[in-house]
Image (cartoon, rainbow, N blue to C red):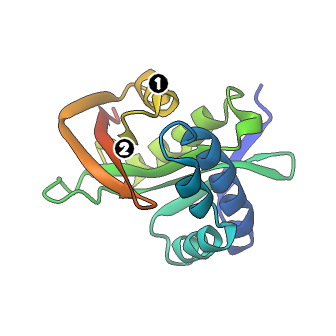
């Protein structure tokens, strides 16, 4: 039985979410974004402000994974932000686990919570945008049943760096 519990985030969780987000991003994007840009993107304070606002306005909905009393991951999900998508399409806006908890079921627990939350909102499909060079994230999503939609590949700017992203999609049924 997993010791990881998932619950809705509270405003008090914003700093811990920002710390997890920063630590995970530094590891995940190490070979994707140049070091200088990565360091510039690693402001816990900026991320904390973003996640406080997200939690406060429930956009996206945010859930945290807790191991004991420590937040070790989070997921943000809501309706798809992509133009011209059906109202029954949800999106994983962000899903991160603390690198010290990678491969310990945190991502799966967060995905399960997001899937359930999106289904409760009436969504029938879910998407996620993932950098093509982030093999770990691509593998995670594909193991969860997502399929790449290569026709959606686009260039996004992250911290001033251009990154190729692709949308992944799966049914919630």
Q: Is residue 99 above or below residue 122?
A: above
Which residue is rendered at x = 56% and y = 60% of the image?
62
Which residue is rendered at x = 74% and y = 61% of the image?
16
Which mark, by number, is residue 2?
A: none
- Quarter of the picture holding the N terminus: top right
Which residue is rendered at x = 52% and y = 28% of the image?
136
Secondary element type, mark 1: helix
Give left or right: position of 21 versus 13. left
Residue named by callout 1: 139
Which residue is rendered at x = 29% and y = 36% of the image?
169
Q: Position of residue 74 (x, y in %)?
A: 62, 51
Compare residues 44 and 73 and report the one nearer the observer.
Answer: 44
Q: Position of residue 102 (x, y in %)?
A: 69, 32
Q: Is residue 44 above or below residue 147?
A: below
Compare residues 88 and 142 and report the one nearer the observer.
Answer: 142
Can residue 81 be seen in this snapshot?
A: yes
- Quarter of the picture holding the C terminus: top left
Give left or right: position of 85 versus 67. left
Residue named by callout 2: 128
Q: Position of residue 3 (x, y in %)?
A: 80, 34
Image quadrant in which you'd find residue 84: bottom left
Mark closer to the chain start, 2 or 1: 2
């Amino acid at each position: 039985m997993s010791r990881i519990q998932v619950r809705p985030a509270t405003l008090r969780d914003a700093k811990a979410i920002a710390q997890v987000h920063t630590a995970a991003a530094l590891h995940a994007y190490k070979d994707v974004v140049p070091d200088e840009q990565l360091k510039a993107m690693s402001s816990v304070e900026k991320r904390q402000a973003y996640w406080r606002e997200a939690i406060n306005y429930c956009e996206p909905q945010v859930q945290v994974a807790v191991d004991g009393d420590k937040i070790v991951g989070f997921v943000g999900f809501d309706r798809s932000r992509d133009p011209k998508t059906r109202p029954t399409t949800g999106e994983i806006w962000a899903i991160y686990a603390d690198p010290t908890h990678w491969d310990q079921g945190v991502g799966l627990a967060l995905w399960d919570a997001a899937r359930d939350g999106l289904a409760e909102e009436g969504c029938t499909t879910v998407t996620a945008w993932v950098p093509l060079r982030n093999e770990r994230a691509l593998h995670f999503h594909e193991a969860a049943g997502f399929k790449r939609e290569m026709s959606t590949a686009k260039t996004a700017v992250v911290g001033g760096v251009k990154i190729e992203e692709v949308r992944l999609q799966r049914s919630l049924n």
